[in-house]
Amino acid sequence: MNIYVGNLSYSVTEDEMGELFAEYGEVSTVNIITDKYTGQSKGFGFVEMAKQADAEEAIKALNGSLVKGRNLKVNQARPREERPRRPRY
C-alpha cells in the first residue's frame, strides 16, 4: 500500500522516515518529494509498505504524531491525477 506523509519537517531524511514506518512492518520504498531546482524537501513524501494490514496500522499510529516539531499527516495515497500540460513558450 502506498502511504502519503505530509507536513514533514524539511530536515527529515528518507532513512529516518523508513525507520519510523519499519516499526509497523516491512517498508518497500520511501520517497521524499524535493524541488527539482534546489533539492530542498517540499515537506511531503510517500512510503510503500508490503502488507496492507501493516500500512493501515502505521497510518492509525502515525497520523497526527509529532516528528521533529511537526504533526504528521498520514493517510492512504490517492492515485496521481493527470494534469493538462501547459504550453511552453
Image (cartoon, rainbow, N blue to C red):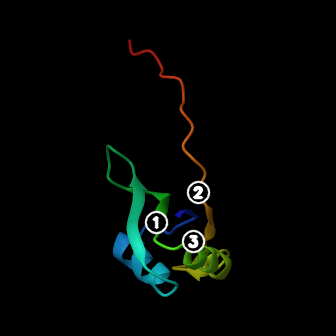
Q: Is residue 8 left or right of residue 63?
A: left
| Mark pair 2, 3: CA separation | 13 Å
The structure residue drawn at horizontal position 37% and vertical position 70%, both measured from the top left corner, is 14
Q: Which of marks 2 and 3 is in front?
A: 3
Q: Do the residues labelled 2 and 3 touch (CB within 8 Å)?
A: no
Which quadrant holds residue 55? bottom right
The structure residue drawn at horizontal position 58% and vertical position 64%, both measured from the top left corner, is 7
Which element carries disc 1, helix, strand or loop?
Answer: strand
Q: Are marks 2 and 1 in contact (CB under 8 Å)?
A: no
| Mark pair 1, 3: CA separation | 10 Å
Towards the viewer: 24 or 18: 24
In this view, 14 is above or below 62 = above
Q: Is residue 52 left or right of residue 63?
A: left
In this view, 72 is above or below 66 = above
Q: Do the residues labelled 1 and 3 touch (CB within 8 Å)?
A: no
Residue to which mark 1 is pinned: 48
> What amino acid type should be assigned to the residue bearing mark 1?
Glu
Label 1 Cα neighbours within 10 Å, binned few <14 / some 14-19 / many ≥20: many
Residue to which mark 2 is pinned: 77
> What amino acid type should be assigned to the residue bearing mark 2?
Ala
> What amino acid type should be assigned to the residue bearing mark 3?
Gln
In this view, 39 is above or below 68 = above
Which element carries disc 3, helix, strand or loop?
Answer: helix
Which label number is shown at residue 36? none
- Looking at the image, tell me whether mark 2 or mark 1 is earlier in sequence order: 1
Residue to which mark 3 is pinned: 52
- Looking at the image, tell me whether mark 2 or mark 3 is earlier in sequence order: 3
